[in-house]
Image: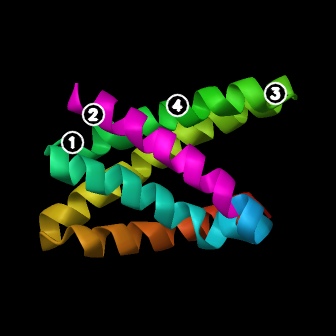
Amino acid sequence: MIEIIGGTISALIAYSLNGLVLKWKGRKSIVFLVPFLEEISKDLITFFLKGNFIGTHLIFGIIEALYDWIYTKNRKAAWLAAIISVLSHSFFGICTYFLYLWTEQILFAIVIIGIIHSLWNYFITR
């Protein structure tokens, strides 16, 4: 239940902030700012609620997948975007979980996964 709450709150925060950042800095924010905003919101909420990183990331990915499905006009692209959202955010959650277990440093995990997420966004938007 904590993961559903954390993933949902995080998605609402990210959606709001991402919209502002996109208006402020344009498309390059998808690579340089959005990943860090998303990782900070997902992981700090999970950390403070003592939830499961993988579960929170999965819920976030499902919510992003629904958004992709609804707002992507091309149905074939919508399916692909939705599947990639769930898989990629689940992967980020697994990585966050293991980095946090290994280091016991949530900020370190957020920075490293933020960088990985940035690289992912760079390659996926090319």
Front-lying residue, 27 or 57:
27
Q: Position of residue 109 (x, y in %)?
A: 29, 69
Q: Which mark is residue 3?
A: 2
Hey, what amino acid is under mark 4? Ile
Q: Secondary structure at mark 4?
A: helix
Q: Earlier in the sequence, mark 4 or mark 3?
A: 4
Where are the magenta residues, as a range?
A: 1-21
Name the secondary structure under disc 2: helix
Nearer the observer: mark 1 or 3; the answer is 1
| Marking on residue 31 | none
Disc 1 from disc 4: Cα separation: 17 Å
What residue is shown at x 22% (from left), y 24% (from top)? 1
Ranked by sequence position, the earlier of labels 4 and 2 is: 2
Q: Whole-Å distance between the Cαs marked 4 and 3?
A: 18 Å
Q: Are marks 1 and 2 in contact (CB under 8 Å)?
A: yes
* Residue kind at label 1, given as amino acid type: Asn
Splitting the image into 4 quarters, where does residue 43 fall? bottom left
Identify residue for label 4. 63
Which circle marks residue 76 in the picture? 3
